[in-house]
Image (cartoon, rainbow, N blue to C red):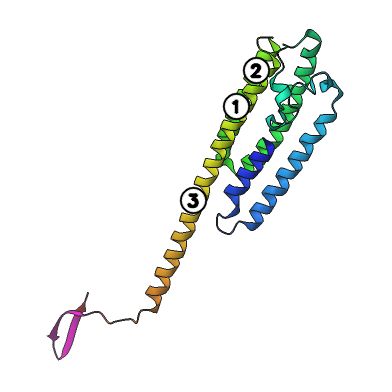
Amino acid sequence: MIDRILAASALAIALGGCTYVHSYFAESDMAEAKAFCETLRSDPAIRPVASKLPLISPDEITPEMLAIDATPTDAELGAINALAKDQQQCRRRIRAVVKEHEPTLIATQDELNMKLDLVTAQLLQKKMSYGNANRLYRQAALEASNKLTEQAKQDLANAEEREDETWRSIGRGLADAAKPSVPRADKSCSWVDSSVNCNSR
């Protein structure tokens, strides 16, 4: 999911006017956040569920993980809690980058995070199997990815429209400046004593 958020953010940022530098910093900041998330894999507290749940992103879910019928054991609940805390740290980093560089995508990301947390809560209550939780994680991530892509496309279209309007406005200004000045026609002229007085428009 991190890769999808990065790709959608990059698409939204890439061609929106003079944004090369903006795009560079957005991608750099996202790469740093992603690197931070990757360090969380080494947390020894999450090892009991490392092969049963995605550690960083729902994109890690394998067919084998979807097929797990077992619910968490009491011993695994601590690992799930630790994993949830690690993921919260990761999401905060990602959210900060998206908020700074592409704030229109925040609502979709927040919605995804809420859905992931709701599934995790069900796991902690032992109300669903690992396989079912993984399926719901994947579905939520796919829906969010589609929304992010659509939002990024819309943001790009809006940026292109603003840029087009800017160029049209510049073109109109240049065309107006190139027109020869034509004296305005007189409204009326009349004699005032021995002089002619014309009231211009």
Q: Is residue 163 left or right of residue 83?
A: left
Residue contact between numbered discs 3 and 1, judged by CB atoms under 8 Å: no
Q: Nearer the viewer, mark 2 or mark 3?
A: 2
Quarter of the image holding residue 15? bottom right
Q: Amino acid at mark 1?
A: Gln
Task: Give the class, few, some or many, for how many residues have Cα within 10 Å of label 3's Cα (few <14, many ≥20).
Answer: some
Residue wearing tag 1: 139
Give coordinates of residue 21: x percent, y percent: 66, 56
Task: State which tag comes first along the sequence, 1 or 2.
Answer: 2
Quarter of the image holding residue 61? top right
Please name whichever residue, 164 or 130, is drawn nearer the observer in this view of the structure.
Answer: 130
Give coordinates of residue 190: x percent, y percent: 13, 84
173 above or below 1? below
Residue wearing tag 2: 132
Task: Give the class, few, some or many, for how many residues have Cα within 10 Å of label 1's Cα (few <14, many ≥20).
Answer: some
Q: Amino acid at mark 2?
A: Asn
Quarter of the image holding residue 76? top right
Q: Could you tell me which secondary element the residue under label 3 belongs to?
A: helix
Task: Give the class, few, some or many, for how many residues have Cα within 10 Å of label 2's Cα (few <14, many ≥20).
Answer: many
Q: Could you tell me which secondary element the residue under label 2 belongs to?
A: helix
Q: Which mark is residue 92?
A: none
Task: State which tag comes first along the sequence, 2 or 3.
Answer: 2
Q: What residue lies at 51% left-to-right and 53% top-to-bottom?
A: 159
Q: What residue lies at 27% left-to-right and 82% top-to-bottom?
A: 183
